[in-house]
Image: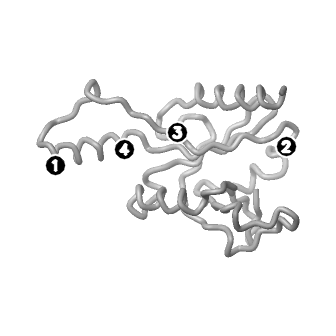
Amino acid sequence: MQLDDAIQAVRTFHEKTASPIADHLCEWAEGKPGEWFTLCFTEQMGRYLAILFPNVNRSIACFKVGSFASYEEIVTAKDCKVLFRPLCFVSVTGHGFDLDLKGRIPDSSEIGFVDTRNVDPIEPFIEGEVIKTIGPFPVCWDCRPRGVDIGGFVDEQVASRNALDRR
């Protein structure tokens, strides 16, 4: 979590391929990522999660239009399966998120992507130009972005992280 000049929390995802991921998200969202994704925060079993969750209904509608335009066929829900993997960060336990940062996250928030290939592991201070920021995204606190229940996904992510920590 990085703090911007206005002392608001800005979630940053650190990944070897962060720049291409950010570019792909912007391209997929036609330059309007806040219409295509929701940034969800939740806490479970002493961990907090930050999840960039797609607007599933909009994605399906877009697929239907594209399918009709390409193949002149009407696609129904029984004709397809929707597969996606949301970007998800799961914290360590004892993080202090609720006390320190929760109140600093506005109803609409940006995300920073940090390509770890551009960060010195010995001096990990992150310069502003290393962070590729996209958004803003609507923020969700109830595990129901745009009415889709993601509680099962949250449970899986926490269980997976707990299993890794026990190793």
Q: Is residue 135 left or right of residue 121?
A: left
Foreground mark, 3 or 4, reads 3
The residue that appears at 36% across and 45% down in the rendered structure is 58
Q: Earlier in the sequence, mark 3 or mark 2?
A: 3
Q: CA distance from mark 2 to mark 1?
A: 49 Å
Image quadrant assignment for residue 56 = top left
Q: CA distance from mark 1 to mark 3?
A: 26 Å
Work out whether 154 lies above or below 140. above
Q: Earlier in the sequence, mark 2 or mark 1?
A: 1
Q: Earlier in the sequence, mark 1 or mark 4?
A: 4
Tag shown at residue 69? 1
Q: Which residue is mark 4?
A: 59
Which amino acid is tagged 3?
Arg
Q: Which residue is mark 3?
A: 85
The residue that appears at 54% across and 42% down in the rendered structure is 86
Which amino acid is tagged 1?
Ala
Q: CA distance from mark 3 to mark 2?
A: 25 Å
Image quadrant assignment for residue 156 = top right
Q: Earlier in the sequence, mark 1 or mark 3?
A: 1
Foreground mark, 2 or 1, reads 1
Which amino acid is tagged 4?
Ser
Work out whether 68 lies above or below 135. above
Q: Residues within 10 Å of mark 1 (few under 14, many from 20)?
A: few
Tag shown at residue 164? none
